[in-house]
Each structure stands twice: as structure tokens, then as C-alpha cells.
Image (cartoon, rainbow, N blue to C red):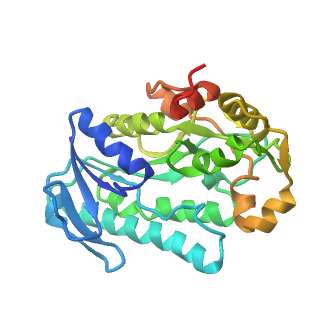
Amino acid sequence: MKVAITGASGLLGGALVPSLRDAGHEVVRLVRRPARAGDEARWDPAAGTIDAAALEGVDAAVNLSGENLAGGRWSEARKALLRSSRLGPTRLLAETLARLKAKPQVLVSASAIGYYGDRGDAWLTESEPPGGDFLARLTTDWENAAQPAAAAGIRVVHPRLGVVLSPTGGALEKMLLPFKAGLGGVLGPGTQYMSWIAVDDVLGAIRHLLERDDLAGPVNVAAPEPVTNAAFTKALGRVLGRPTVARVPAFALRLAFGEMADATVLASMRVRSDKLLASGYRFRLPALEGALRHVLGRPS
């Protein structure tokens, strides 16, 4: 396929581009500066402009644009940036794809399990309603922003991504320094569920969603074995060979991160990826310790 990608320079996009090329696909990267290579197309979401001609003939699109959720404390200005970096670009892409003479077959537009909010020990499938916090509202609106493409008959899939395990970005990268220093430990009560996924399986799942024409709408993309924060802490300590006796109380996390703490590290989301598994996807790294050892290059 010929696949257009937004967010191609980010954590996931930077890994997805070579993954797709290795599988024999052609990639068009949407960039926010003047295009300098044959595989680039210019867009400027803030100005509402995009090189639609460069998208004619693409078979699929993957939308990964969006400011890092954990990039700073959620002030009102920060929350506005998180919204504008997702909703405007997604809507612009969806409307542009809908107007093409030769429309793509599929748009895979990223989402997150933050859609569900803090749900305790309950198992969460795609049929669950959204939560009520800022992150849940943001994720709901992010998915809705792709509606113009669906209305034009394009198959739209929203992979609701769990916590991505990668040493080069995201939550795991932030944990490595304190854990390696022997300062890692349980966050808050430690009973909150963490639905995680190795970056290798994110790439595999996105390729699967592009290729399976029977999948549409929200699809949970998280490993089949979610764990509590306490279990995750112990596993990461074992992999790194470091003690994990520290504990960060919930009130300290709230003081440091405010609203973001309750929506992310303290929230419990126990997600099932039944829809993905039923479609034939098989996780490369289904167990936490094996996944951590793989992404961190720490064989047992």
C-alpha cells in the first residue's frame, strides 16, 4: 500500500515508517516545513492547509499527531494545547481525505485508553462508555474529529493505545533514571491497573489494522495481561536488577503533577483487546517481564 503518515517524526511514527517500508509499503510523510524529499508532503494544521494533491492515490493514512500528554503539568494553557494539537490536525486530515477524487481505503487515527477514565478493577472493552475527566473528554473528541472521513465511506479505525513501552520515549523512558538509581517504587496505592503494550506490538497492530478490512471504530490495543502498578514496579526492578523499595504517595504525585496524576499514573484501566485478538492478531510480547527485557535489551 501507499500510506500517508502524520506524526512521522514522533516516538511511534519514527518507528512505524521503517516498519511499513520493511513490509513493502510506500510511505508519504506529512511534514510541517517545506517538503525536501520525494516521500514528504507539506501540511500546516495551524493554518488549515495541506498538500491534497500529494495525497491523491494513497491507499491508507495513519494519524499519529498530538502533543505529548505527559509533557508538562496540565495548566489551562497546556490542556488547550493538548486539544488543539489533536482535534484540528485530525479534522483537517479527515476532511482532506474525504474530498480526494480517489479516497483511501482506511484511516487509522490514534486514540488512547484514557477514553475510559479511572475504572478500578473492571475489565474494559470497546463497548464501555467514556469516563468523565479531561483525558476521557479529550480522547472522545479526538476520535470524533475523524468523522468526516467515515462519513465519506472511508474505513476509520481508532487504536486505543495502552501505555507504550519504549526506552526512547513515553512513560518507560521517564522511569528508567530513578529505577536505575535504585529510587524506583510504587506510585500511590499500587493497586491501580496499568494496561501496557510493547512498541513492537503497537507497530504490528497498526499494520494489522491497515490490512484487515473487517475492523472499524475503536479497537483496544494493549497486551493481554494488564498488571497493577505494584506488579509493574517489581517486574521493572527485576529486569534492571535494582531495588524498588521507594513509595511515592498519591498526595505527592498530585502536588507535583496536579490533575494529570489522577488521569494517568493513579488511574486504573484494566483493558481487554478482545476485538484485536478475535481478528487474528497475535501479540509478539504478551507478558510484561519478557516485553521489558526485549525493549530494554536485558535478556534473562
For the C terminus, the quadrant is top right
Residue lying farthest to the top in this orientation: 300
The residue positioned 55% from the left and 51% from the top of the image is: 170
Residue 94 seen from this side: yes
Q: Position of residue 179 (x, y in %)?
A: 70, 42
Observer-nearest of 162 and 102: 162
Observer-nearest of 292 and 273: 292
* Above or below 278: residue 138: below
Q: Position of residue 265 (x, y in %)?
A: 72, 52
Residue 156 seen from this side: no
Residue lying farthest to the front in this orientation: 181
Residue 261 occupies which quadrant of the picture? bottom right
Observer-nearest of 96 and 38: 38
The residue positioned 56% from the left and 34% from the top of the image is: 273
For the N terminus, the quadrant is top left
Q: Position of residue 109 (x, y in %)?
A: 41, 53
The residue positioned 26% from the left and 69% from the top of the image is: 43
Residue 150 occupies which quadrant of the picture? bottom left
The residue positioned 77% from the left and 46% from the top of the image is: 183
* Above or below 99: residue 62: above
